[in-house]
Amino acid sequence: MAFEGFKCIDFEFDGLGAKVVVPNVTPNGLWALKTEYFNAFPAEETELLNRGWHIAFNVNHTRWAEPLDLERKAKFVDYVSERFDLSKKAALVGMSCGGLIAVKFAALYPEKVSCLYLDAPVMNLLSCPAALGDSQTSLLEEYIRCTGRTLSQLLSYRDNPIDKMDILLKNDLPIILAAGDSDTVVPYHENGALLEKYYKENNGTIYVFMKKGVGHHPHGLEDPTIIADLIEKHSGK
């Protein structure tokens, strides 16, 4: 199989699909793990591939960062690192619910993460999927079906990404954050802005790119080299 003109190795990992995309140039030993929506808005991943990076992905049971998927992803990072002779740390690429997965994964396994690129990340489950704030899109039925957690339970849930920000900071994990200022699915002020505020107030390393007049899509920046440069800066190159 091919991905954006690059060789894509498809295989099964722990009962679900997985893939690793191989660069066309000499590999540099660095790699990024896209946490969800593998084919969505791949400009930054393509830029990294052109620089010698590998890109990996493994299918999740759900997009809501439940423990089973996070545990599998930890095993996947170890597997990819060993099989492809890559760094033991991956840069995480998390878009929307992929951001939810990336933050919760990094909080559980900071030793496996070099940095996080988050684009319109879900940080607050009361905003998305519950739409109890300014989000105009409720995904609550899907969330309840996938997790078995009711709205009543979600109201007292303390395992949101925003509950993990101190762990990311304590482990000095750099954040690259992009979002549209007109996002009505995952409103920035209820999600990414909370991470931005916390990191800035506590002298964490964070880069913020606000896209004026942009909604939840498209993810990424018009110039993908900006994000790729920062990922490389914080990944040992």
Image (cartoon, grey):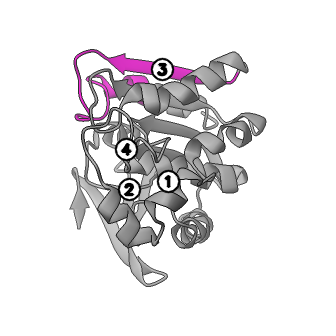
Q: Position of residue 22 (x, y in %)?
A: 38, 57
Q: Quadrant of the N terminus?
A: bottom left
* Residue appearing at x 55%, y 73% in the figure: 68
| Vertical arrangement, residue 57 with respect to residue 227, above or below | below
Residue 172 at what x, y percent from top left?
73, 34
C-alpha distance separating marks 2 and 1? 8 Å
Under mark 3, the amino acid is Val
Q: Depth-wise, is mark 2 or mark 1 nearer the camera? A: 1
Task: Residue at 64% x, 43% y: name it.
Answer: 163
Q: From the viewer's perspective, is residue 101 above or below residue 176? A: below
Q: Give neighbour class at mark 1: few <14, some 14-19, many 20+ (Cα, 10 Å).
A: many
Q: Is 136 situated left or right of 103 in this image?
A: left
Horizontally, residue 102 falls left or right of residue 146, namely right
The residue type indicated by label 4 comes to Ser
User: To which residue does mark 1 refer?
Assistant: 101
How far apart, in angstroms, are the residues tagged by discs 4 and 2? 9 Å
Gap in Å between the C-alphas at discs 3 and 4? 15 Å
Nearer the observer, 48 or 73: 73
Disc 2 element: loop
Tell me whether circle 3 and circle 2 mark residues in contact (CB < 8 Å).
Answer: no
* Total labels drawn: 4
Give residue 93's mark: none
Give the residues in magenta. Answer: 204-228
4 and 2 marks in contact (CB < 8 Å)? yes
The amino acid type found where label 2 is placed reads Glu
The first of marks 1 and 3 along the sequence is: 1
Disc number placed over residue 36 in the picture, else none: 2
Would residue 161 appear left or right of 184 to someone viewing this image? Answer: right
Residue that carries the numbered disc 3 in the rendered image: 208
